[in-house]
Image (cartoon, rainbow, N blue to C red):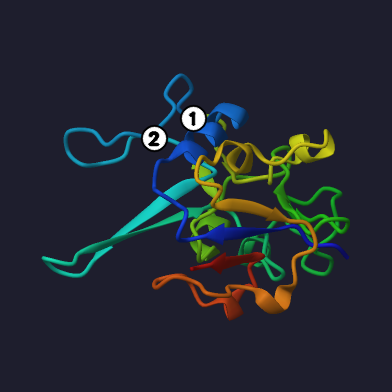
Amino acid sequence: MAQFGWLIDLDKCTGCDTCTIACKSENNTRPLGSPMPFKNGRGVLPDHVSYRWVVKTESGVYPTPTITFVTSACNHCEHPACWAACPVADPNDIHNEQNTAIFKREEDGIVLINQDVCIGCKRCIHACPYGAPQFNSVTEKVEKCTFCIHRLQAGFDPACVTSCVGNALHVVENFDLNESGENAPEGFADPSLTVPAVKFATG
């Protein structure tokens, strides 16, 4: 089985959030008409869904503080915690696409949520160590990154990859799961938990 995955160059990500905006535009995620989820006056994020976002981590002290940017989304894991937690997924066959809410496509390893079957119980949200599944309060279903499968089928890269101004984000069509989590930044969840299809480059 082929596995699509991500390669993220940590030295090239500038934290510009272009990937976040491109993803929201491409997938029309909530809130419609607003490209980014801004905090309100109380520092709380309004109701929103973002399939991709940038984690910004500050460290160090003056005069040498540092900030790390990591573009993040669903990692289409080999052993998805979302699937394992879902009460409407086939516990015996992760590739079963019939009448199951979460499944992993056999031809490319992309993990999808069937909106017609999802019951919105949020168990996948609590199970995922990467924060990928997100609840849509309008549809009362859970959504997440689809690897822009509609674009892949048309011969294009995902919107986030195409828009990345720093060339920091890449698609790996034949991802080697032995490289899962390679060079992961500090704070990244233990790759052995789910074997995510993502690796990182530095230098």
Give left or right: position of 145 versus 70. Answer: right
Q: Which residue reaches farthest top? A: 33
Across and down, in percent, residue 147 comes to: 68, 46
| Mark 1 lies on residue | 30
Name the residue nearer the viewer: 187 or 128: 187
Structural crowding at the residue carrying mark 2, measured as other residues with C-alpha within 10 Å and reported as few (<14), some (14–19) or many (≥20)? few
Q: Amino acid at mark 1?
A: Arg
Residue type (three-letter) at the residue carrying disc 2? Asp
* Distance Cα–Cα, label 1 vs label 2: 8 Å
In front: 137, or 113? 113
With respect to residue 140, does 4 lie above or below? below
Specify which label sits upstream in the sequence, 1 or 2: 1
Residue matched to label 2:
47
Compared with 173, 155 (above or below) is above
Above or below, 32 against 54 in this view is: above
Q: Quadrant of residue 105?
A: bottom right
For this rendering, which residue is in front, 20 or 115? Answer: 20
Q: Are marks 1 and 2 in contact (CB under 8 Å)?
A: yes
Decide if residue 129 is on the left or right side of residue 159.
Answer: left
For the N terminus, the image quarter is bottom right
Residue 108 lies in quadrant: bottom right
